[in-house]
Image (spheres, rainbow, N blue to C red):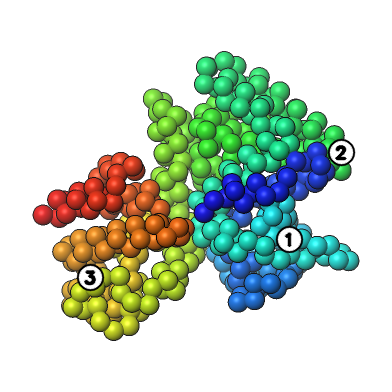
Amino acid sequence: MDIRSYLNINDLDIRKTHDARFMDQKVTPDVLSIIADCAINVVGSDINKEFTVQDIWDSQYFNENVKAVFNKPSVKNPAAKHEYDKFIQQPLKALSYAGVLSCKRRGQKNYFKIVSPEILQYIAFKDRNAYVFLCDYIEKVLRDSGLMAYFENYKTICDVGDDYAAEYIRIKNRFERFIKGNTSIKKDFEPKRIFPKIFNIYAVENGLPGSEAGKASKHPFHYSDLMYNRINWRDVKKAKGISRQESKKISRQESEDILVSQNTGYDHYLTQKAVNIIKAKYLDSEIHDTWGNGQATQVHHIFPKNKFPELAHYTENLIKLTPSQHSNKAHKNGNYQYVDKDYQLICLLAKAETIEESLRAGEFIYSKESFVHVINKGLSLSLKYDMSFKEIKDVIRKIFR
């Protein structure tokens, strides 16, 4: 998935487009991902179908999942209309500025159309992908607009330990003047609202202090801090003696697990989405043994959901099996509270093969980093992310001896 090459097709210079809606308050990784998912759901099999904010708002899929994930009121509540309009419109406008969607104004409505189904599906797949997209997208906008040097200077100042708080104020003021000077926005409020969404993506990706309540935060920003469903994770943020690289690793995986485990509706949505992806991808079982004949209809959690809820939504932890494999081998005698260790080894080795094959084909539903993370959590290991699949499988075999 080469997002950067796709983004490079268009010139995203704000000085030329004069469009400030490339980013906004509701454009967070979790919101962007679910709105992309809802857009795909609305168009269905007709990829060329136009859709509006109202089409997403009226869909049952949006109503059910947004209520569950974000604890928002029903779309039937008239008092929520303005909030929902921004919640849907702002991510769609950002995607259209990036060229992932097209947007045409007719009358009082914006009509959107999918331009890049592959990238939209990538974003919809999970929040992590939406975050990766936003990192590349924001960098492209900043470089095209002549602003990137100021962000890089902030990073340099943080690296050498100088007064980054003062530099934060300078870059914030410069950005606000830039937006008012190059777009139709002339008042103070909106640039102040947009800036943190851009700055904090850059801060998280580089392990830097972010923007918090109009000031530079005292500690590096984490992945979870970017979310609309933001969690209270101050103890981790304030921990002393954590290097920037360690902090970055935490923000990439651990905070995602905490975020999911603290939100039951969110957990259910992500898990069901991952299960549906595995169901749709494989017709046959991923394990080719005696019990693998027949139609594969079951999706099995290699590390069980009741013991590892934070891993339930990882496609790397899900494997397609036949009913016989699921009830007789993975869970002996149909005891779903028990996971057979011998078959767990077989599942892990088979999943390693599946993931390696998928990555070789250029697909995006797995990552080796996430597979290693699942193994580390499930088996209490500390495998390195740069291990080869052969090395990973060798370690797994030794663990199960």
Amino acid type, residue under disc 3 in the picture: Ala
Residue 343 visible in the shown view: yes
Please state the horizontal and vertical placement of residue 104, each as a whole percent of the image.
Answer: 80, 62
Badge 1 element: strand
As helix, strand or loop, the secondary structure at mark 3 comes to helix
Q: Is residue 217 left or right of residue 366?
A: right
Which residue appears at 24% of the width and 78% of the height?
292
Q: Is residue 261 left or right of residue 120?
A: left
Q: Amino acid at mark 1?
A: Ser
Residue 335 visible in rendering: no
Marks 2/1: CA–CA distance: 26 Å
Where is residue 241 shown, x and y percent of the image? 39, 25
- Residue, disc 3: 330
Residue 227: x and y in percent read 56, 48
Answer few, some or many: residues within 10 Å of disc 1's Cα (few below 14, many 20 plus, some between 14 and 19): some
Query: Which of the 4 quarters of the picture holds residue 115?
Result: bottom right
Residue 304 placement, left or right of 164: left
Q: Could you say where residue 259 lies in the image, as x and y percent from the top left?
A: 47, 50
Q: Is residue 34 left or right of residue 52?
A: left
Q: Nearer the viewer, residue 188 or 20?
A: 20
Disc 1 target residue: 102
Question: Mark 3 or mark 1: which is in front?
Answer: 1
The disc, 3 or 1, on the residue closer to the chain's N-terminal end is 1
Q: Which residue is mark 2?
A: 186
| Callout 2 amino acid | Lys
Q: Residue furthest left?
A: 401
Query: Disc 2 vs disc 1: which is toward the camera?
Result: 1
Q: Which image quarter: residue 312?
A: bottom left
Tell whether label 1 touches label 3 (CB within 8 Å).
no
